[in-house]
Image (spheres, rainbow, N blue to C red):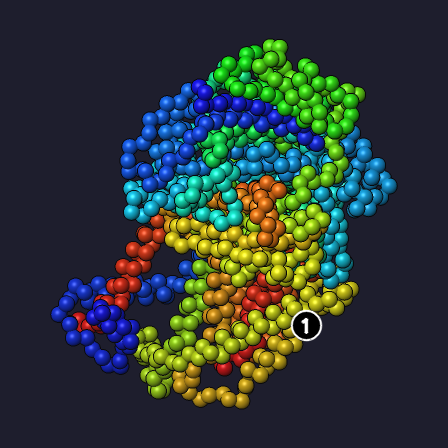
């Protein structure tokens, strides 16, 4: 207790004016204290340089992520997986049955069969193979277009096991490239009778043919896990199995394929355990001899993407080409992850702690077909079947730069965090500076010239009114929330402009803010003695704005690195440069510049209209739209208010 | 030999999905024997001299004064909808043990009920090489309606101990000691068909031991093996014809000489032409009977479906049982979840049932969240539940939740119940922490209608086991995390502590 009292006393202690130390004799402590003070002083003085360095290091780090300086070869962490250790039995007879199913599916497609018709066909096929199957109808009530469909699914009860765990093999009717995924469905159907021949399955195998693209699987998974979604009206599932640990979704839209593309990004930036991808990569390469790529990115396509005017000598350098090949994968990844979009229907599984990826048969003239994909799936299923526990081992934080190379969390995370550190240093420095004011001695110019040395400058503390800037920030976020409510409103979604951009929504909030900042600016009350005034509002607002933005970036960096990196790039420098100017035209120009640079950039860069983001939120529960409205846009608005404020006030 | 009688029987039943159900029952009757009373445990027991009765089992039963004992070890998921009721209703996936034992007079009994229950499960664990020691007080309950005795109970106060261990699967090491208890082992008689290679490849398989007392006959031991084979998978072609070599990879070459009777019963297909070879002794009521003693050896029973080039699976088959039960749990949170139980009654009259749920202590029910609805009607129906037996979990004891319900005719009753998942200390996690915890199956016990004392006409049914995810740390990382966290805390604590307790004073230096 005495210790606690002592600590409390220390906390309450404030340096009094003119208070002098008593223990003067303790010279070594004094020396240490002075040295420390000098060091702090030096760091403080060079803070602008440090911040600039941090920005440079952070942004350079981001640019270097695709380079060969970073990156490791992928490896299998979980010993139980044992990928590629089994002989595969998938044969040409199974390929033939897949071809037969494909013929029937093509007939369904040609006569434009309805969802119910297609589901009935799949169900009867499952039943004929001796697997219990059933259908699930669903309907989404979203703003602009109602969505409905029928899923079909079957449970192959693994012999000899209690069926507490399950593996999912799924295919959606629509491929992720928009084509009908007939070959994917034919593969799944032909797998049923094949997998039924073996008693080695330790987990139930659930086959799902989901309707539509994302919507069907969202309805199925929601019903399986008891999700209560107000916009979704779905039939309950009559058939059930155990806890799903892993899932593979098969996407095979073309006639043949040359490479196996792996899509792995889940909703809201979640990623599946890397072991799953590494296993499939290994199996595909060594069991089926199918090369694996990320997405549908073939290495040779890089020539078509980069500008032609680059000199040939650069082209011939492997380092140079590799950089762009990796950068292309990373940019695509950042595109998915920033918006919280799933790159395929596998992404919906991640919300339910199921590790899932999409196997995409990259359409090509050849040489691979049902035989290769069947063997890949068979061997992958055997590997997933080996699991004794869920995939774990912290293998969820990574950036894939290629199918066989990845960045560990320690290699990419610091880039965004360094930028956020630079921002919070800036904010804290402004906050500290705002607490002091220079006290000019009342002397005439002559004597001032004589004593030009800085030692004569005296500093005096001044009051910092933190309440007003905090209220302003709160109001911006509340208005952001209202903006979001407005954006998700039915009548707004049905506006024709909402299909193109976010722009029509924003002027209203801009008007609100111009008036607010005009209210805050009061040019008449110009003071005579600056030092007697409290700290100006704009400095405090800017300090808090920077601190908040930095906190948001560093927290997001662990949850969704791409979003954090995008925030660091977009907000880092502009928020630090926000400053008030005199004269209304200047102010407006500056604020509008912020608006022009920070707001539409976000949308134009990736050309995602608002309606898509709202759809993602309403149907799939993607956080991106609310995040932009409630967090990102208010941060920008706060910077705009800083520009609108009077410099002296 | 005169006061012991050994009978063996194999029951073969073709199922509608092309599979074949087989049930081996070996009955050993100890005539006029009486179970030991708990009150005599302190004194010397009578001598045990058996000829065919298994001594190892007999000793255990006498040692712990067990009146009735049921042990079953099963693997697989019994599919009531397409396979119907099994001959022996104990088909829950995992290890199940329940025993009726006398409590004994407080003054005379030398060893407590709980101690005998512990001794019994440990002795059986040793006898059958199974982890039955896990069936300890963390899993033991005493249900009210379920598990009524199959035999008779002596006129003293008896008690039931019931425990289920879902993670214990049957394997060869359990079958070998089981076969050892048989008088002819697996050398002759129908026991020679017990081929572990085939038995443990069956879609569903399980073994059971039942000891019961009939007042007018004596103590009876029933050793049983049930299995569901898939001839289509075993033959590698789309035909459901079956014969002993295809199913068991064996035939019966010798009869067991000590058997009083040795029969094979085959349920005949309801429709379609077929041939059954060899000719049975009797065939009628849809059942053919073979006598292993008198039949020509080697005996190979086979059933061929004529005019059936390919077996076609029935489309939308009707369920084979009048009642059905399905249980699932939803919720992705690691802190709480919800049970969904669906009870269907396809009978034309209301059926009274009891529902038994005995989850271990990691699950904590919220009884006030219990909802009962019928069919699609969302209105709660409080009248469905008649009585409710509920013993909540405390420390590490299991919950006992056993309501009795009246299922309306031709309707489906939905029960939901919310539960909390315990946050475990890190030493309490099993070695395969990320797998989750198995919950024992729930049991549906059809009861006779109100008032009448007639035994229920339908056997009990088990649901599948469930796997529950608890909040689990990533055990592959703890040392990194501990070291990192400790370093950071030490660093920050040191600095902050210094700042708070030391006094820094600005001084003037001359």
Answer left or right for B102 relative to B77.
Answer: left
Depth order, front residue of A406/B188: B188
Mark 1 burial class by Cα count in 10 Å: few <14, some 14-19, many 20+:
few
Who's the residue at 63% across and 77% down the image? Answer: A512
Q: Quadrant of residue A207?
A: top right
Going by the image, does B439 lie left or right of A623?
Answer: left
Q: Is residue A429 above or below residue B144?
A: below
Q: Position of residue A576 (x, y in %)?
A: 50, 66
The answer to whether any part of residue A494 appears in the image is yes
Q: Which residue is mark 1?
A: A507
Residue A138 place in picture, x, y as percent: 72, 52
Which residue is depicted at the point 53% across and 31% down? Answer: B206
| A122 relative position to B447: left or right | right
Q: Nearer the viewer, residue B172 or B72?
A: B72
Asked whether residue A359 appears in the rendered view, the answer is no
| In this view, A532 is above or below A393 | below
Q: Is residue B5 above or below residue B92?
A: above
Q: Residue at x 29, y 63 (%)?
A: B496
Choose between A98 and B96: the one closer to the eye: B96
Kind of element beneath mark 1: helix
Image coordinates of residue B48 in percent, x first then y, are 36, 26
Residue lying furthest right: A111
Question: In the image as oriented, which residue stretches furthest toward the left?
Answer: A25
Which corner quadrant holds the N terminus of chain A? bottom left
Report the residue at 27% width, 59% height from top: B494
């Amino acid at each position: 207790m005495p210790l606690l009292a002592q600590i409390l006393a220390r906390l309450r202690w404030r340096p009094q004016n003119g208070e002098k130390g008593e223990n003067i004799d303790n010279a070594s402590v004094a020396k240490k204290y002075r040295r420390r003070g000098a060091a702090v002083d030096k760091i403080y003085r060079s803070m602008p340089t440090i911040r600039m360095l941090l920005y440079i290091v952070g942004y350079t780090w981001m640019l270097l992520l695709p380079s060969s300086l970073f990156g490791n070869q992928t490896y299998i962490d979980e010993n139980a997986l044992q990928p590629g250790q089994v002989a595969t039995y998938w044969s040409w007879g199974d390929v033939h049955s897949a071809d037969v199913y494909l013929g029937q599916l093509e007939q369904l497609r040609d006569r434009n069969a309805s969802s119910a018709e297609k589901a009935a066909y799949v169900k009867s096929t499952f039943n004929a193979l001796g697997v219990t199957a059933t259908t699930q109808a669903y309907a989404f009530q979203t703003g602009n277009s109602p969505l409905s469909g029928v899923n079909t699914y079957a449970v192959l009860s693994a012999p000899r096991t209690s069926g507490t765990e399950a593996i999912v093999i799924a295919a959606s009717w629509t491929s992720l490239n928009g084509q009908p995924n007939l070959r994917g469905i034919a593969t799944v159907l032909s797998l049923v009778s094949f997998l039924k021949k073996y008693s080695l399955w330790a987990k139930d195998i659930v086959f799902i043919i989901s309707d539509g693209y994302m919507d069907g699987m969202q309805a199925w998974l929601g019903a399986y896990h008891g999700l209560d979604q107000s916009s979704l009206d779905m039939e309950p599932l009559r058939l059930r199995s155990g806890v799903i640990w892993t899932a593979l979704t098969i996407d095979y839209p073309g006639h043949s394929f040359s490479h196996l593309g792996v899509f792995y990004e889940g909703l809201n930036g979640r990623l599946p355990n890397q072991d799953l991808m590494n296993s499939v990569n290994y199996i595909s390469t060594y069991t089926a001899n199918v090369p694996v790529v990320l997405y549908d990115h073939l290495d040779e396509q890089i020539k078509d993407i980069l500008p032609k005017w680059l000199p040939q000598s650069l082209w011939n350098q492997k380092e140079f080409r590799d950089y762009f090949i990796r950068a292309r994968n990373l940019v695509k990844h950042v595109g998915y992850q920033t918006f919280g979009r799933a790159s395929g229907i596998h992404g919906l599984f991640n919300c339910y702690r199921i590790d899932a990826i999409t196997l995409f048969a990259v359409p090509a003239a050849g040489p691979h077909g049902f035989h290769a994909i069947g063997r890949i799936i068979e061997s992958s299923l055997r590997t997933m079947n080996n699991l004794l526990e869920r995939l774990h081992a912290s293998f969820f934080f990574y950036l894939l730069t290629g199918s066989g190379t990845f960045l560990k969390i320690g290699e990419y995370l610091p880039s965004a965090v360094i930028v956020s550190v630079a921002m919070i240093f800036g904010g804290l420095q402004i906050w500290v500076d705002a607490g002091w004011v220079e006290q000019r001695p009342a002397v005439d110019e002559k004597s001032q010239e004589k004593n030009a040395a800085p030692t004569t400058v005296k500093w005096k503390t001044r009051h910092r009114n933190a309440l007003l800037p905090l209220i302003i920030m709160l109001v911006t976020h509340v208005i952001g929330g209202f903006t979001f409510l407005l954006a998700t409103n039915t009548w707004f979604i049905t506006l024709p402009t909402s299909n193109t951009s976010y722009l029509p929504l924003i002027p209203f909030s801009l008007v609100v803010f111009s008036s607010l900042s005009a209210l805050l600016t009061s040019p008449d009350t110009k003071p005579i003695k600056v030092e007697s005034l409290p700290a100006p509002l704009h400095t405090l607002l800017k300090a808090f704005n920077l601190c908040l933005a930095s906190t948001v970036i560093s927290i997001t960096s662990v949850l969704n690195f791409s979003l954090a990196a995008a925030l660091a790039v977009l907000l880092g420098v502009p928020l630090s440069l926000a400053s008030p100017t005199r004269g209304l035209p200047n102010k407006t120009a500056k604020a509008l510049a912020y608006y022009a640079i920070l707001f539409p950039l976000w949308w134009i860069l990736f050309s995602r209209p608002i309606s898509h983001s709202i759809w993602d939120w309403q149907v799939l529960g993607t956080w991106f739209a609310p995040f932009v409205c409630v967090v990102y846009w208010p941060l920008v608005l706060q910077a705009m208010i800083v520009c609108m404020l009077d410099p002296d006030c | 030999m005169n006061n012991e009688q050994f009978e063996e029987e194999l029951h073969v039943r073709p199922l509608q999905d092309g599979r074949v159900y087989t049930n081996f029952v070996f009955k050993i009757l100890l005539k006029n024997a009486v179970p030991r009373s708990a009150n005599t445990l302190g004194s010397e027991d009578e001598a045990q001299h058996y000829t065919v009765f298994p001594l190892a089992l007999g000793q255990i039963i006498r040692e712990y004064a067990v009146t009735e004992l049921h042990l079953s070890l099963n693997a697989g998921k019994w599919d009531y909808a397409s396979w119907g009721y099994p001959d022996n209703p104990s088909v829950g996936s995992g290890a199940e043990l329940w025993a009726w034992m006398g409590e004994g007079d407080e003054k005379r009994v030398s060893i407590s009920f709980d101690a005998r229950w512990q001794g019994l499960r440990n002795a059986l664990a040793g006898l059958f090489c199974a982890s039955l020691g896990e069936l300890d007080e963390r899993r033991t309950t005493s249900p009210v309606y379920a598990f009524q005795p199959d035999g008779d109970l002596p006129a003293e106060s008896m008690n039931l101990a019931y425990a289920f261990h879902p993670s214990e699967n049957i394997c060869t090491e359990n079958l070998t000691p089981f076969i050892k208890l048989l008088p002819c082992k697996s050398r002759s008689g129908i026991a020679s068909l017990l081929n572990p290679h085939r038995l443990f490849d069956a879609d569903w398989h399980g073994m059971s031991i039942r000891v019961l007392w009939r007042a007018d006959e004596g103590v009876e031991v029933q050793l049983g093996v049930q299995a569901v084979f898939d001839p289509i998978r075993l033959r590698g072609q789309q035909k459901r014809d079956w014969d002993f070599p295809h199913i068991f990879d064996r035939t019966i070459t010798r009869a067991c000489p000590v058997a009083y009777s040795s029969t094979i019963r085959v349920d005949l297909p309801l429709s379609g032409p077929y041939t059954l070879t060899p000719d049975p002794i009797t065939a009628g009521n849809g059942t053919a009977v073979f006598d292993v003693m008198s039949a020509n050896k080697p005996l190979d029973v086979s059933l061929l479906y004529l005019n059936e080039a390919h077996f076609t699976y029935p489309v939308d088959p009707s369920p084979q049982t009048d009642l059905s039960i399905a249980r699932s749990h939803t919720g992705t949170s690691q802190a709480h979840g919800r049970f969904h139980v669906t009870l269907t009654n396809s009978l034309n009259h209301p059926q009274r049932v009891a529902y038994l749920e005995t989850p271990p202590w990691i699950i904590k029910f919220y009884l006030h969240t219990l909802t009962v609805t019928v069919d699609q009607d969302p209105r709660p129906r409080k009248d469905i539940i008649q009585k409710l037996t509920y013993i909540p979990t405390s420390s590490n004891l299991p919950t006992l939740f056993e309501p009795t319900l009246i299922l309306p005719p031709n309707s489906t009753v939905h029960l939901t119940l919310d539960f909390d998942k315990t946050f475990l200390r890190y030493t309490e996690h099993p070695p395969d922490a990320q797998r989750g915890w198995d919950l024992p199956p729930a049991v549906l016990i059809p009861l006779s209608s109100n008032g009448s004392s007639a035994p229920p006409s339908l056997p009990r049914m088990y649901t599948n086991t469930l796997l529950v995810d608890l909040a689990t740390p990533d055990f592959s990382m703890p040392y990194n995390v501990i070291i990192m966290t400790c370093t950071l805390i030490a660093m920050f604590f040191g600095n902050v502590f210094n700042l708070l307790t030391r006094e820094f004073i600005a001084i003037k230096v001359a």
